[in-house]
Image: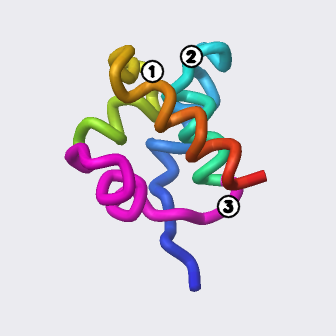
Amino acid sequence: MSYGYSAKLIYLNKRANGWLLGVRLGRACIRNNIPVAEVAEELGVSRQTVYNWFIGARSPQSGIAPDVRDYIDSLY
C-alpha cells in the first residue's frame, strides 16, 4: 500500500537540515512509507506537528525527543 507523500513534502524534507531530529524522522518515514497520521498517533502529537518536524519548521521538544529517536530506531 502506498501512502503517497506529496511531492512538496518530499521536496521540503530533502532541502531541510538532515541533522534535525524531525527531518531524520521524516526521511525514515518517507523511506519506509509510513503515513504521517500513524507517526502522529504513535507519538501522541498532531499530524501538523509531525509535518512541521518532517520539513524542519519545528523540532521535537526535549520531552518527546527520546520517543522520536526510539521510533526512528525501530524503523531500521
Disc 1 to disc 2, C-alpha distance: 7 Å
Q: CA distance from mark 3 to mark 2?
A: 18 Å
- Give, as a three-letter code, the residue at label 1: Gly
Q: Is residue 75 above or below residue 71?
A: below
The question of residue 30 being in magenta is answered with no
Q: Indicate the position of residue 47 as horizontal and vertical percent values.
A: 26, 49
Name the image colouring.
rainbow
Q: Nearer the viewer, residue 49 or 8?
A: 49
x, y percent for residue 74: 67, 53
Q: Is residue 73 above or below residue 4?
A: above
Looking at the rendered image, the disc whose residue lies closer to the viewer, 1 or 2, is 2
Q: Are marks 1 and 2 in contact (CB under 8 Å)?
A: yes
- From the image, tell me which residue sits under label 3: 32
Residue 41 position by quadrant? bottom left
Q: Earlier in the sequence, mark 1 or mark 2?
A: 2
Left or right: residue 60 versus residue 44 is: right
Name the quadrant containing residue 72: top right
Amino acid found under the numbered disc labelled 3: Asn
Q: Residues within 10 Å of mark 2 (few under 14, many from 20)?
A: some
Mark 1 falls on what kind of element?
loop
Q: Quadrant of the N terminus?
A: bottom right
Which label sits on residue 19? none
Amino acid type for the residue under numbered disc 2: Leu
Q: Could you tell me which residue is drawn at 50 percent across and 68 percent down?
A: 4
Q: Which residue bears the numbered disc 1?
A: 56
Tag 3 or tag 1, which sits nearer the N-term? Answer: 3
User: Magenta region: which residues?
Assistant: 31-47
Q: Around disc 3, counting alpha carbons within 10 Å, would you say few (fewer than 14), some (14 to 19), or many (20 or more)?
A: few
Position of residue 16 measured from the top left corner of the image (x, y, whole percent) = 56, 19
